[in-house]
Amino acid sequence: MSRRQALAGALLLVLWAALPSAAAVPVDVQAEIEYLLGYVRASDCTFYRNGTWSDAAAAEAHLREKYAFVAASGRIGTAADFIAKVATRSSLSGQAYEVSCNGGAGVPSGQWLTEALDHHREVNAKPGTRLERARPDDDGPPSAVRM
């Protein structure tokens, strides 16, 4: 590959990355994801990822970095996408993430965050609007959010 082709390829990559429409996450979805990231950070729980338990601040930082990468590729359209594509399992090892609160047994992070999102939506639902659940196949009330 010539130097000119390499420069042209690099320029195209930079231009593609700068296109806001390809990776724009809707504002309301961004707000729910920010809620979830704050929920993780404030949880005082420990998080299991790739064989290591870490504190809430480290977990939030990792999820925020991974979210930026996945969102830039245009693969996040809902908060449920964030949970499924960012906060459920390692992209490298495929291992599921877990959360342990108050010294309890670890639970799948996807379940923990889905319950938090369901609760957040329920608490913040506007009167007269239909509440859309994070898990469309679950029509029961969300279980208690563990903190």
Image (cartoon, grey):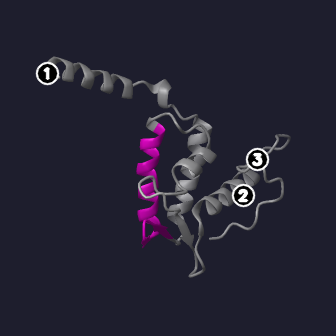
Q: In this figure, what is the number of numbered marks?
A: 3
Q: Position of residue 28 (x, y in %)?
A: 62, 39
Distance CA(mark 2)–CA(mark 3): 14 Å
Determine the residue positioned at 48% across, 39% down: 71
Which residue, as the protein is rendered here, is positioned at the far front? 1
The answer to if 60 sits in the magenta stretch is: yes
Pair 2/3: label in front: 3
As helix, strand or loop, the secondary structure at mark 1 comes to helix
Q: Which residue is mark 2?
A: 119
Where does the C terminus fall, quadrant-wise?
Answer: bottom right
Instruction: Residue lying at the far right in this picture: please name it.
Output: 128
User: Which residue is tagged 1?
Assistant: 3
Residue at left 54%, top 48%?
85
User: Which residue bears the numbered disc 3?
Assistant: 136
Residue 61 versus residue 2: which sits nearer the camera? 2
Q: Residues within 10 Å of mark 2 (few under 14, many from 20)?
A: some
N-term mark: 1 or 3:
1
Q: Nearer the viewer, mark 2 or mark 1?
A: 1
Query: Do the numbered discs 1 and 3 sit on residues whose CB atoms are within 8 Å?
Result: no
State the residue lying farthest toward the left: 3
